[in-house]
Amino acid sequence: MRVSRVLGAGARHATALLAAAVVLAGCGPSNTSTGAESSTLVAYTGQSGDYQINFNPYAPANIGGTGTIFQTLFFYNVVRDADPVPRLGAGFDWNADGTQLSITLRDGVTWSDGEKFTADDVVFTLGMISEHKGMNSTGYAGRAAAVDDAHVVVTFDRPSFADGPSLLGRTYIVPEHEWKDIADPAVAVVEHPVGTGPYVLEEFKPQAYTLKANPTYWGGEPAVKKVRYLALSGNQAGAAALKAGQVDWQTGPVPDVGDVGKNYPGYRAVITPVNQIALVTCSNAALGCRGPQTDPAVRQAIHHAIDRTQTNALAFENTGSHISPGFLLPDRDGDLISARLRDRTAPMRPDPAKAQQILESAGYAKGPDGVYAKDGAPVSLTLSTVAGWTDYITAVDTMSQQLQRIGIKLTAQQVSWNEFVDARDRGNYQMIIDSLYQGPAPDPYYLYNYFFSTAQTAAVGAKPGPNVSRFSDPQVDQALDALKLLDPADTTARQPHLETIQTRVEQAMPYIPVLTQGTISIYHDAKFTGWPTDDDLYAFPAVWSHPDNAEVLVRLKPTGKRGG
């Protein structure tokens, strides 16, 4: 799932100018240094096309408000191994065997409509998730009860330590008095959100919506008084808006990111290696996938044919970094990477001889057209990306040429975002380029459970969870079940199960590793202080990441100065 952005199609100069005009129209005077505009932050998440209003934090069509309007009990930093930060919760404890979680709530919190926040709201939210499968993306299976207004106990039938970060850090608490009569909260459109967070909705328009500081926020009214989220035509429009000083926070590729201070005066960049770029294959023929990519030998050959150094330079301005075939983050999880892997990290340079040897050992032979084939079927594949994801489009074009050199025909295809999502979810694709995202805590268990668990997939034609590759492996499932029962602090007991998953994933390779993505966030340092930096990554600094974006907003302070 590409959570990072929906970038505009390869727009030409005229499109960029038009988009810049839209920004000017939507934001008012440029770089105003006094009044409301000096404390208004303009954000671009990569939204391409008009917004459709929906602030339901559990609906697939949610456009925002998670963290800023609706809050979790605690904040977990997925970038750094740090203690969870209290939000609506004040503290929590597990019993010895991980079957009971006791939560103490923050005192003195009110909803933005003035109603008191209590334990009943937490119990209602968790019960609603249990009752509506479409809302239960984490597999929550607890039973919550209010002890009193400030205490909740959640009981599980088996040890559930691994459920803690999802429940505490990614479950957005909603007001019972507003939601109790909603018939289907999994898909309901929420136009007038009532939350406990630092912001409330001020205005919605399809081209932009605005949040304003919540004057009754329990943490004190934020110094950033308004946040305006823009819809533009794509990353070229975003770059033009940055150049004009009309956007204060943007995440996505920009030209010449290595010299941001010169090209975008008043701005700085932070590049964070968190998500992992992969060629996602519809890998499982038993679940209905069709095509050469269902053969692990083809996937392994592609893995060894990719020139990651060239791809990084041409598509990502060298902001990508090493990726492990076991899909642990080398920087964060280095101590956990298995010595049993054939490659600790994916080779940055191609090995054409090895790629061809893998294919020939599996019964493939090169035809007169130079393309490998088996049983009369050529290794000819379609690799899809979203029109407008310019970095990914360049990467696909680059890898197509690399694979052609070893006898694999790869046809690049650009589709709309809606077409991309529909094909991905239904399994009507051969290969797509996308990124695997991290879970609610800095622990590889969550990514494994999302993308490699049989429970998170479905046959072609049915909508899966995050495991869109349709990968299914009994050994991986057993290891995930074992990890779920173990205390995350027991690293010795967990390591054999993590190694089983890594080695099985490397062998099957349903997601072909490309690079660890250097997520580029550009921020207006001249206008606001308090941004996350390489030295202080108190949150993942991507503008579209939630609830991290709320953590950033409440720390920022306007300088009152002009930006440029």
Image (cartoon, rainbow, N blue to C red):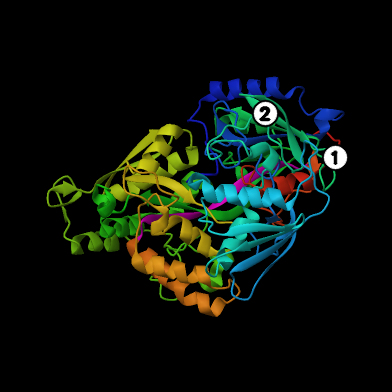
Whether residue 300 sits left or right of residue 204 in the image: it is: left
Q: Secondary structure at mark 1?
A: loop
Q: Residue at x 70, y 50 (%)?
A: 120
Residue 214, horizontal then vertical, whole percent:
80, 38
Q: Residue at x 69, y 64 (%)?
A: 102
Q: Residue at x 29, y 58 (%)?
A: 301
Which label is found at residue 530? none
Q: Which residues are magenta?
A: 509-525
Please tell me whether residue 298 is drawn above or below residue 174 in the rendered image: below
Q: Residue at x 58, y 69 (%)?
A: 99
Mark 2, Cα crowd under 10 Å, few <14 / some 14-19 / many 20+, is many
Q: Secondary structure at mark 2?
A: strand
Mark 1, Cα crowd under 10 Å, few <14 / some 14-19 / many 20+, is some
Residue 351, horizontal then vertical, whole percent:
33, 61
Residue 50, horizontal then vertical, whole percent:
56, 25
Q: Which residue is mark 2?
A: 209
Please tell me whether residue 163 is drawn above or below residue 180 in the rendered image: below
Q: Is residue 76 visible?
A: no
| Residues tagged 2 and 1 counted as in contact (Cβ below 8 A) | no
Which label is found at residue 559? 1
| Residue 447 is covered by the magenta coloring | no
Whether residue 79 sits left or right of residue 267 in the image: it is: left
359 or 453: nearer the eye?
453
Give the amino acid at mark 2.
Tyr
70 or 545: nearer the eye?
70
* C-alpha distance separating marks 2 and 1: 23 Å
Mark whose residue sits in front, 2 or 1: 2
Residue lying farthest to the bottom in this orientation: 492
Give the amino acid at mark 1.
Thr
